[in-house]
Amino acid sequence: MRDGSRTKELIAHTALHLFVEKGITETTIRDIAGAAGIAEGTLYRHYESKDQLAWELFSTNYLDFARELDRLQEEYETLKDKLTAMIRQFCAFFDRDPVLFSYLLLAQHAQLKKVTPEMETAVTVLQKVIAQGMARREVPEMEVELAAAMVLGVVLEVAIFKAYSRITQELSQLSETLTAACWRVLTGGGIS
Amino acid sequence: MRDGSRTKELIAHTALHLFVEKGITETTIRDIAGAAGIAEGTLYRHYESKDQLAWELFSTNYLDFARELDRLQEEYETLKDKLTAMIRQFCAFFDRDPVLFSYLLLAQHAQLKKVTPEMETAVTVLQKVIAQGMARREVPEMEVELAAAMVLGVVLEVAIFKAYSRITQELSQLSETLTAACWRVLTGGGIS
DNA sequence: TTAATAAATGAGTGAACGCTCACATTAGGA
DNA sequence: TCCTAATGTGAGCGTTCACTCATTTATTAA
């Protein structure tokens, strides 16, 4: 018999990697238990169901990250500073645990049904920050959702490519390039 | 008894919508057959397996689109013109069939296992075009993969947001804004 | 009208999956 | 040492799924 909480962590860690590698629906309880070296029944001592396991991984990791971003942006005054800090934070987070990040993307975009638009995601934080920046006349007025989508696009797609190993550098090394690109997207305003 | 080829099209059309709505793995053969108003066995007269059906949908639609982009870019001389044309084409394609586009994203990013990096995708075309533009000194030198990822990011993420209905305009209306944003990302060069 | 062929059908099959539960093992206090 | 609670186990259950095939229905040619 092992320590219960360590087993729970082992399951979470193993499940996370398999979810990223094969997708949530393609990963079976048998896969997770086998890879973790435990029996299937043991998994159910720690998690109610497979759905609940996936949801807990998403919830704890992603929502914490979004709230962290929100706390962080409050420390800065200007949109440029907020954006710089948020992207740096994102890059550091990504480099620290690219697997976790891939899972968050996967979970949010496709496979977790419980994810509601109401919850405070990183997207919402980004939109809020940009709206404030527009009110401060730091960047030209435009549809906030569009602006946030473009900024997110630059960062997310690069991160995805990085995850698929088509880009060799650490994401942190690209942090300033990404911030600059995002800033140009925002400040360019309308049609050039 | 209906005409065989019309039944096949009916199946493809129905499957596509269900794949987008619920994801490939969450859509069952019974779902498709039921929604199309045919028996399960009939589906297997036209498609070898569920995987083959999904693969055929992806293959015919996506690869055709990538080749179309490649043909299109050859009609233009400069990177700016190529990029403008490609993005306009993409936006028109998206507006014509957003469901199809969502499927392509879904299929490529997560759920189709057979997608190989060797095949000539839209990404490859974009990288090729950007590399040519750099050789022509139209845009500053930088890692081609990174440049392509940033450009793709702007367009894809906006399209995804559009698909999730958080942006109200047609994508075609945003075409020039997107092109301008992509161009700014490319011409900004290194760190600002 | 009839024979031959193509298309459609849906009950049935085996495999895989999420999950349960009766039982085994271990840890720590009395 | 014994008892109790916590933890671990894996065979097995019920369900769902992709897929098959013997049979029926429609179409075409003679």
Image (tube, coloured by chain):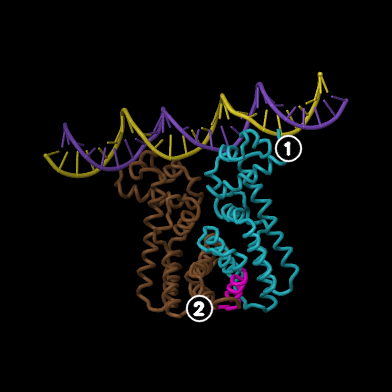
Chain colours: A brown, B cyan, C yellow, D purple
Q: Position of residue B120 (x, y in %)?
A: 68, 58
Alpha carbon separation for disc pair 2 and 1? 57 Å
Residue B188 falls within the magenta-colored stretch: yes
Q: Do pointers 2 and 1 mark residues of a single chain?
A: no
* Occupied quadrant, residue A119: bottom left
Amino acid type at mark 2: Pro
Between A167 and A105, the residue placed more toward the observer is A105
Amino acid type at mark 1: Asp
Quadrant into which the N terminus of chain B falls: top right
Packing grade of label 1 (10 A; few <14, some 14-19, many >=20) is few
| Chain assignment, label 1 | B
Q: Position of residue B85 (x, y in %)?
A: 69, 68
Return the residue at label 2. A140
| Chain assignment, label 2 | A
Return the residue at label 1. B3
Numbered disc 1: secondary structure: loop
Check the image and report above or below for B41 versus A80: above
Residue at image point 60% right, 56% down: B98
Q: Position of residue A180 (x, y in %)?
A: 51, 76
* Part of the protein shown in magenta: B175-192
Residue at image point 74% right, 71% down: B76
Check the image and report above or below for D23 versus A144: above
Q: How many marks?
A: 2
In this rendering, position of residue B63 left or right of residue B110: right
Residue at image point 71% right, 63% down: B70
In this rendering, position of residue B48 left or right of residue A24: right
**Helix, strand or loop for the magenta stretch, by majority:** helix
Check the image and report above or below for A7 versus B147: above
